């Protein structure tokens, strides 16, 4: 448990600094790109993240889970097979992406170089995921923490230098913003994979045992494939979300330009501020996946119950004050980006979305560690369907517009958190109010 808390501390501390830098990054983007340019930047990000997701193949999750469940003497063999899978998968994905990118219309409104720059992310993210998964599995969270901080720092420095000493038109400024994002990922890859190679060389000098090749690949794929499918669905929905929201707003009677600006204020300003405390949730999620996996493999349900109670308490203690600050100081916070009352109202209305999102992230780690990927997938599907339905219904209404969009986002977040929580409580044998904990049968 000491390693567990130490990992949370390292990740949370670095993530806090990273989120501070993220705010500065978004402030620079808001001022350099303007409301319309920021809206375009936020529109293309989900599509880039979709490619990032496919490139990772969620190997960081499957490797960390498998490494945590196995003795050290098996680690070398697991990593060997993981690298083999990565090389094959990356080659196929790179060729497929190169063939399909010219026909993807979302890139048509951006600089011609953008669609080719994102190709760099395929090998970079794939091999970074292997290194990240290994360090997560052996609970070396300090390296993960440094890499997270390094990504944000490089992006900030790159944006500051390029925008401070050079002048660009609107299209070139957007290209520079995307280049800074991709460049930061390249630096993280060089850092993590260098450390991974050193660690792998050390494993070669230690006693090791081989595992059945098919067995290792089957175990990795058993987590990577459904988790990738899960993340893929979420990423596709996130990629569609800007068009769903802007389409609903346009249908309600406002212009396309105004809809883009409002979306930029929603995601570029309100969401940037509201997701700031999520660095703690993300840190919990990274640490919990291997920790819950190992504890679940040992059938130690009492410890799982204790971990859930601690996670819910930690989330409540930081989440509640955070959304209260966002609500009461919204004008002051959003003025750091734009002098606009609209973004402040968005931030205030979105407090349920942010608060329940803080609970969702660590609970998703619980479900992955408990081998409940199917339940996790269905939860996300249902919450997304209901959320999008409300966004389209109320957002396209002249009387509701963006208020209706926010109601849909809030509903989806609350529903997802409740489904996750009830499922976990049932699995590990604990009452929904954290009272009356029971000893769970090991054969259940």
Image (cartoon, rainbow, N blue to C red):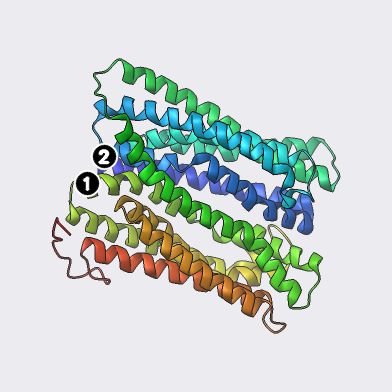
**Is disc 2 surrounded by few (<14), some (14 to 19) or many (20+) residues within 10 Å?**
many
Residue 126 position in % (x across, y down) = 52, 35
Q: Identify the mark at residue 86; answer none if there is no mark.
A: none
Q: Identify the mark at residue 69; answer none if there is no mark.
A: 2
Residue 424 position in % (x across, y down) = 30, 62
- Quadrant for residue 206, please give it: top left
x 41%, y 66%: residue: 417
Q: Left or right of 309: which side holds 385?
A: right
- For the residue labelled by badge 2, is the local secondary structure a helix, a strand or a loop? helix
Image position of 192 with respect to 231: above or below: above
Please say whether residue 166 is visible from this viewpoint: yes
x 31%, y 50%: residue: 369
Label 2 or label 1, whichever comes before in sequence order: 2
Please say whether residue 150 is visible from this viewpoint: no
Please name the residue that numbered disc 1 is placed on.
Answer: 297
**Is disc 1 surrounded by few (<14), some (14 to 19) or many (20+) residues within 10 Å?**
some
Residue 48 position in % (x across, y down) = 63, 46
- Quadrant for residue 96, please give it: top right
The quadrant the C terminus occupies is bottom left
x 62%, y 62%: residue: 241
Q: Left or right of 417: which side holds 152?
A: right
Residue 276 position in % (x across, y down) = 54, 55
Q: Left or right of 296: which side holds 133?
A: right
x 56%, y 34%: residue: 92
Q: Which residue lies furthest to the bottom in this view?
A: 399
- For the residue labelled by badge 1, is the local secondary structure a helix, a strand or a loop? helix
Image position of 259 with respect to 373: above or below: below
Q: What is the spatial separation of the Cα atoms under label 2 and label 1, in whole angstroms?
A: 7 Å
Q: Are marks 2 and 1 in contact (CB under 8 Å)?
A: yes
Image position of 55 with respect to 301: above or below: above
């Amino acid at each position: 448990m000491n390693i567990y808390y130490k990992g949370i501390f390292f990740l949370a501390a670095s993530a806090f600094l990273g989120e501070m830098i993220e705010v500065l990054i978004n402030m620079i983007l808001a001022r350099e790109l303007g409301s319309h340019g920021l809206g375009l930047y936020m529109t293309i990000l989900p599509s880039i993240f979709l490619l990032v997701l496919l490139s990772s193949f969620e190997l960081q999750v499957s490797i960390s889970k498998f490494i945590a469940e196995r003795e050290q003497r098996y680690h070398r063999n697991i990593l060997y097979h993981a690298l083999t899978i990565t090389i094959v998968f990356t080659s196929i994905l790179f060729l497929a992406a190169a063939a399909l990118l010219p026909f993807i219309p979302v890139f048509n409104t951006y600089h011609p170089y953008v669609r080719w720059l994102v190709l760099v992310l395929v090998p970079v993210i794939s091999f970074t995921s292997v290194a990240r998964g290994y360090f997560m599995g052996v609970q070396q969270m300090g390296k993960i923490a440094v890499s997270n901080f390094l990504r944000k720092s490089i992006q900030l420095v790159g944006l500051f230098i390029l925008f401070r000493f050079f002048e660009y038109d609107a299209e070139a400024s957007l290209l520079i913003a995307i280049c800074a994002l991709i460049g930061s990922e390249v630096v993280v890859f060089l850092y993590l994979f260098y450390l991974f190679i050193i660690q792998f060389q050390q494993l070669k000098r230690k006693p090791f045992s081989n595992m059945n090749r098919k067995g290792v690949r089957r175990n990795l794929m058993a987590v990577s494939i459904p988790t990738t499918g899960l993340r893929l669905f979420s990423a596709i929905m996130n990629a569609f979300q800007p068009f769903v929201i802007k389409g609903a707003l346009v249908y309600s009677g406002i212009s396309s330009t105004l809809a883009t600006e409002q979306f930029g204020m929603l995601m570029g300003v309100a969401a940037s501020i509201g997701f700031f405390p999520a660095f703690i949730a993300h840190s919990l999620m990274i640490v919990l996946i291997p920790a819950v996996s190992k504890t679940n493999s040992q059938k130690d349900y009492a410890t799982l119950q204790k971990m859930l109670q601690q996670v819910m308490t930690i989330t409540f203690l930081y989440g509640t004050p955070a959304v209260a600050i966002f609500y009461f100081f919204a004008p002051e916070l959003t003025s750091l980006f734009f002098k606009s009352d609209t973004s402040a109202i968005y931030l205030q209305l979105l407090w349920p979305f942010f608060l329940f999102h803080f609970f969702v992230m660590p609970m998703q780690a619980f479900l992955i560690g408990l081998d409940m990927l199917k339940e996790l997938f269905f939860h996300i599907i249902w919450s997304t369907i209901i959320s999008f339905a409300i966004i389209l219904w109320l957002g396209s209404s002249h009387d509701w517009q963006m208020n209706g969009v926010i109601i849909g986002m809030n509903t989806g977040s609350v529903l997802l958190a409740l489904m996750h929580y009830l499922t976990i409580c049932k699995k590990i044998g604990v009452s929904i109010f954290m009272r009356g904990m029971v000893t769970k049968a090991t054969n259940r």
